[in-house]
Amino acid sequence: MTAADLASIDTPALLIDLDIVGRNLKAMQKKAEKYGVALRPHIKTHKIPELARLQMHSGAIGVTVAKVSEAAVMAEGGIKDIFIANQVVTEEKLNRLAALSKEVQISVGLDSIPAAEKLSNIFTASGLTIEYVMEINSGLNRCGVLPGRDAVELYQAIKGLPSLRFKGIFTHAGQVYGAGSLSEVMEVSRHESEIMVETAQALEQAGTPVEIVSVGSTPTMKVWQGQEGVNEIRPGNYIFHDGIQMSLGVATLAECGLSILTTVISRPARERAILDGGSKAFSSDRGAHGREMAPGFGLVLDKQATLVRLSEEHGIMSLDPDEDLDIGDRVRLIPNH
């Protein structure tokens, strides 16, 4: 895109470089094929059916979503194999899930007896069956049953519920976003896979076949070297990458396919410039899990400047007093997240 092209776009604007996106999709698909695993990317990064279809065209077997509403958008966009990697417990959402299951192949996360009973009741009343994937806590300490014995006990407690079919286990080692080095990222990736394989073995020893053993986050998958017993990966952010992925050492600037275009609307001091993109345009993330990774709220491209503060509609940049930047000039940034 030329400077003239950028000048024709009103701001703030989200820009997607489809050439970079294509390379990112190809690289992750190549990794999945190298290690003989299925790729089921998480689409919460983009939520765009056209991009999901690009992922499917590249070789993905289906998609992962976080919410029933996201699943509905993907189904309407022609995606026919969807996994909701979350707990669905309210009656309204469960009824929407049952309706969607008539249109597409859909499965859902599960980590408790009460959630299983609610799911079973709705699907039994609807005369339908739903596949579930048990969520395992591999260290994030968010949702998920503890690995090993606790997972076996949960399966045994709910295996008799009607209209439910056990499909396998999944986890998200999101604690990787608190890693302080690439070696820590690699350690989390190794632990994530090993915990899941051990849990699958415990379930199988208890007489329960495990069809799916699914792991995934962009950082852990970027450094992943395969693991016997894991057969599905679910990275999401890899389609674009961002400042946090760069700070973890798992992506380069050349792999960042999404940026935010803004306009300088004020320069009230030589060391300060104001952009027309604020907290509504940029993520407020500086890192995760108590570790601040980024020096600002986005990587400023081609300027000696840092986005140091956000209001709803304003981005405040600290910059070199000699930086040539006038009101009306365009500034492009890679968001942190």
Image (spheres, rainbow, N blue to C red):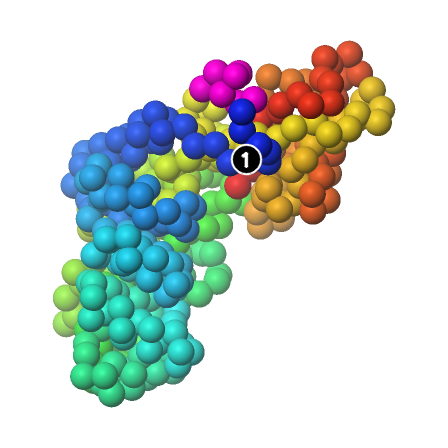
Q: Nearer the viewer, residue 329 or 67?
A: 329
Q: Is residue 99 magenta?
A: no
Main secondary-structure element of the magenta-colored stretch: helix
Horizontal side, residue 121 vs residue 129: left or right: right
Horizontal side, residue 322 vs residue 298: left or right: right
Q: Is residue 166 visible?
A: no
Q: Nearer the viewer, residue 26 or 34?
A: 26
Give coordinates of residue 250: x percent, y percent: 43, 31
- Residue at the image point whose x is 40% and y is 78% from the top: 92
Give coordinates of residue 55: x percent, y percent: 27, 41
In the displayed structure, would residue 285 be above or below residue 13? below
Dot 1 falls on a residue whose secondary structure is strand
Q: Nearer the viewer, residue 26 or 225?
A: 26
- Residue at the image point whose x is 59% and y is 42% from the top: 281
Give coordinates of residue 221: x percent, y percent: 34, 40
Q: Is residue 185 visible?
A: yes
Which residue position holds label 1? 13
